[in-house]
Amino acid sequence: MQITALTTAVFIFFASTNAAARTWEEAYEKAEALVGKMSIEQKVNITTGTGRGLCVGMSGSTTDPDFPALCLQDGPLGVRIADNITAGVSGITASQSWDKKALRKRGEYMGKEFYGKGVHAQLGPDVEVMRSPYAGRIFESFGEDPYLNGVAGVETVLGIQSEGVIAVIKHFVLNNQEHNRTTSSSTVDDRSLHEVWAWPFARAVEAGAGSVMCSYNKINGTYACESDGSLNKLLKSEMGFQGFVMSDWGATHSTVDAANNGLDMTMPGGEGYFGKNLTKAVEEGDVTEERLTDMAKRIVAAYYKMDQDDPDFPEVSLNSVNRTKAPMVDVQEDHAKLVRQLGAEATVLLLNKDEALPLPADLKKIAVLGVDAGPDPNGLNCGGDNGLACNNGTLAMGWGSGSATFPYLISPYEGIKSRAGGDVEVVHSFDSWDTDAAQDLVRDVDVAIVCASSDSGEATVVDGNAGDRNNLTLWHNGDKFIEAVADANEKTIVVIHATGPVTMPWIDHKNIKAVVWSGLPGQESGNSLADVLFGDVNPSGRLPYTIAKNEDDYPVHIDLHDTIDYKENLLVGYKWFDAKNIEPLFEFGFGLSYTNFSFSDLKVKTSDNEGELVSATVAVENTGDVDGAAVVQAYISFPESAGEPPKVLRGFDKVQIKRGHKDRVSFAFDKLSLSVYDVEKDDWVVPSGKYSIHIGASSRDIHQSTSFTL
Ligand code: BGC
């Protein structure tokens, strides 16, 4: 069975749900009229950055006809280099929620804040699939599975763009580590490129993303921002991308090749490849004027699509060179509430022995411990681009352009103390090296809550980690500290803040009764944590990646070769662990709740309808004592001849179910969900044969399976 015109079908579906003001057709009509009046120089102007200014990127403007300089600002979790903004939950932690509605709301509030600051394009979301747990920027995107990344990317794009801001999906493509990120060349087979690495971009393009940022690295020896294969063929032709491609900052390396092979805007500009040199290339016929017009039209169309010609579009109120000069515009509204809710909801409860959590009401004394439990002694936001010099307090985001400035940061200690109230004594020690002091402190407390972290970020070296992590151990003596506390207190609860997976050599310690995976919750960190610890929120987060028993169980470490060979092919994340029969410590999709769910009565139907080739329903019952949300996950096993991993995620739904109640959850699988990429046909194809569907609470906790034939 062969599929054609899939992209178009899905695109139409999303176009109708996207609240952005105009359709692409309407936007292009207006762009055509405006760009039609522009001279070659004017068209070149709007494709060329003018350097960092009010925003980290500013494009050139024109008068007569008038087109404004566009303000492009980082980043994926909030407005960077700005005050009076919300510094919320990172992408990776938002993804832990497995909650489409919450992801959409996050996109919407971010869109509102960027809009309020006069930003035309938010440099996010980052939708790169996590290839290696060591990679510095994995906290910006949505984890190790393309499908989950795609859903989270779509919801974020729709949310941002519904507020009139262009979403810039990045970094296209195969940009999966910080080491040698501007010099290495990634190679991958075409099937894995489509099924894994490009998948989330394709979904976000269908959702109408206005811009794509091409990455620093080379692809098969050619820079990503001048790669005909990835920009012209894959992105623009196959995916039908109608917006504009902007370079990552400094990722343009040529004039003629870049323009002809798909780059539409160079950033930040000033490197000399576009501007006068592009004008000359057009005048000399090395780049056709038609192509230049296409570049300009794509930029102008994205602007019109988001309705940015509205006279009410706010003035830029940022200053990315000297922020003290930025006018004061407060865009926070009550977004902190959403951040707190999402942070709590996304918390993954990894272990809960003897019902240690939620904390009982009769507690008298709690100890909260660790560097990661308190504020940074060097102050809030102590290094530019959060975290650069700021790693001595609780961790709530990674570092680099994917960070934002905290307006405040509630530490675990503050959150717990305020929730515990006056009748409970809360003692603390924020020194993770002084294990003796910590042991003395915890001997007579009812519960010891020990917090530890592991950080990473973009490019810059922090504590010996050049963006990418050197290892997956906890920072600040975390592992030894946890063990020491557990040796001295019979009810020890571990809380982890991390950019990605860590190893847990202490996991079997008899006194460690619970492990709470908080991820990177942003400014409301301590409050979100307290909501879960005290049972005000029943945690319903699930892991968006695999936590391995040993570092060596992961297939991919940081690769220092000039050529990075993606030789794991389709076996990324849990698919590797499944295929190689490696038991993880906590598998992809895993997370506990304060209640229990049972699954029954899986029913599957096939049809000829391409949008719903297979549908399934399953009953889910809350069999525990409290209300809670189940994350029902649907994995597909392809016919053996298809050569797919043992199972792949193709659907999930988060459902609130009251205790004692039962609900039915439905899934629809369209043709694409049941297709593989056929490299010979250069198309998506549904393999014939026997499929299985597995419904479960995680990638390894499967409760109902059945098969069907296509
Ligand atoms: C990063 C991008 C970012 C840009 C602008 C680059 O170094 O890779 O993600 O948007 O800088 O700050």
Image (cartoon, rainbow, N blue to C red):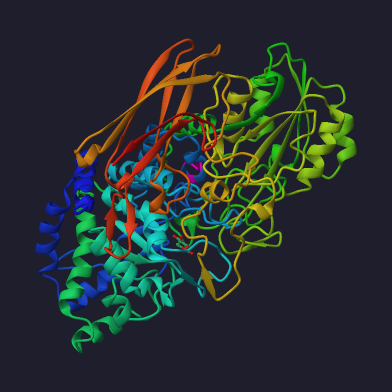
The picture places residue 587, in percent across and down from the top left corner, at 58, 40
The picture places residue 527, in percent across and down from the top left corner, at 59, 29
* Left or right of 464, for residue 524: left
The picture places residue 160, in percent across and down from the top left corner, at 34, 44
In front: 215, or 593?
593
Answer with the quarter of the image where residue 497 lies. Answer: top right
In front: 519, or 554?
554
Q: Which residues are magenta?
A: 86-91
* Left or right of 9, for residue 432: right
Q: Is residue 69 visible?
A: no
Q: Is residue 480 visible?
A: yes
* Left or right of 401, for residue 379: right
Q: Magenta region, mostly helix, strand or loop?
A: loop
Residue drawn at x 48%, y 60% as measured from the top left:
569
Answer with the quarter of the image where residue 256 lies. Answer: bottom left
Quarter of the image containing the C terminus?
top left
Q: Is residue 231 magenta?
A: no
Residue drawn at x 22%, y 63% as measured from the top left:
298
The picture places residue 418, in percent across and down from the top left corner, at 65, 23
Residue drawn at x 70%, y 49% as measured from the top left:
550
In front: 46, or 482?
482
Residue drawn at x 68%, y 50% as measured from the top left:
391
